[in-house]
């Protein structure tokens, strides 16, 4: 009996300067960092990754205020999600509330023992936030 092909889940922490990207292991148990990319390159990066790692879906961090209302970035992310759906029409795109994810990711980086210099490297926080969003999603859906 052959095992069913497993598909990864990708997660995006969207920013206007950098996008953090993470992916699950093939079994959907753990989030793994992929990297940080400029917004204008993310669809190219995803296309390349999807050639070798078939995906079940993409999760996008959705910026809401603490009271659940939309803010300025929500509209920007809505436009980005529409672009993803056009480029990857067969791949479901879902959102997850990202309120506080960057702050939580920053705390996790401090707790990990990384030096301040390494924690402050551009993109490290964005990638950690994408991993946190994905791990939260995996734990809530598993």
Image (cartoon, rainbow, N blue to C red):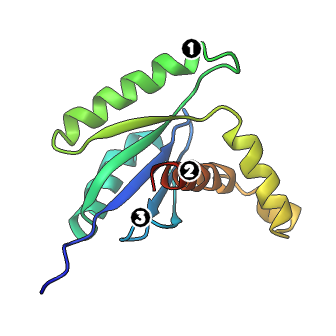
On the image, which quarter does residue 85 sit in? Answer: top left
Q: Nearer the viewer, mark 3 or mark 2?
A: 3
Residue 101 relative to residue 10: left or right: right
Nearer to us in this view, 45 or 109:
109
Name the N-terminal-most of marks 1 and 2.
1
Q: Residue at 56%, 50% (x, y): give it.
A: 130
Q: Residue at 68%, 15% (x, y): give it.
A: 67
Q: Estimate the x, y position of residue 25 in percent, counting from the top left.
A: 42, 70
Q: Nearer the viewer, mark 3 or mark 1?
A: 3
In the drawing, what numbered circle is on residue 130? 2
Q: Is residue 112 above or below residue 60?
A: below
On the image, which quarter does residue 39 sit in? Answer: top left
Mark 1 lies on residue: 70
Mark 2 nearby-residue class (10 Å; few <14, some 14–19, many ≥20): many
Mark 3 lies on residue: 28
In the picture, which quadrant includes the C terminus? bottom left
Q: Estimate the x, y position of residue 35 in percent, counting from the top left.
A: 52, 60
Name the N-terminal-most of marks 3 and 2.
3
Nearer to us in this view, 66 or 78:
66
């Amino acid at each position: 009996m052959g095992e069913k092909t497993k598909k990864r889940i990708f997660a995006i922490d969207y920013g206007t300067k950098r996008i953090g990207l993470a992916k699950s292991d093939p079994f959907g148990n753990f989030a793994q960092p992929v990297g940080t990319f400029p917004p204008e390159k993310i669809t190219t990066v995803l296309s390349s990754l999807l050639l070798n790692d078939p995906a079940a879906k993409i999760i996008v961090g959705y910026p809401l205020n603490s009271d659940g209302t939309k803010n300025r970035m929500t509209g920007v992310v809505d436009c980005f999600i529409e672009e993803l759906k056009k480029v990857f029409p067969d791949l479901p795109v879902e959102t997850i509330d990202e309120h506080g994810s960057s702050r939580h990711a920053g705390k996790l980086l401090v707790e990990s023992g990384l030096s301040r210099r390494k924690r402050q490297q551009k993109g490290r926080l964005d990638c950690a936030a994408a991993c946190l969003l994905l791990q939260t999603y995996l734990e809530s859906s598993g």
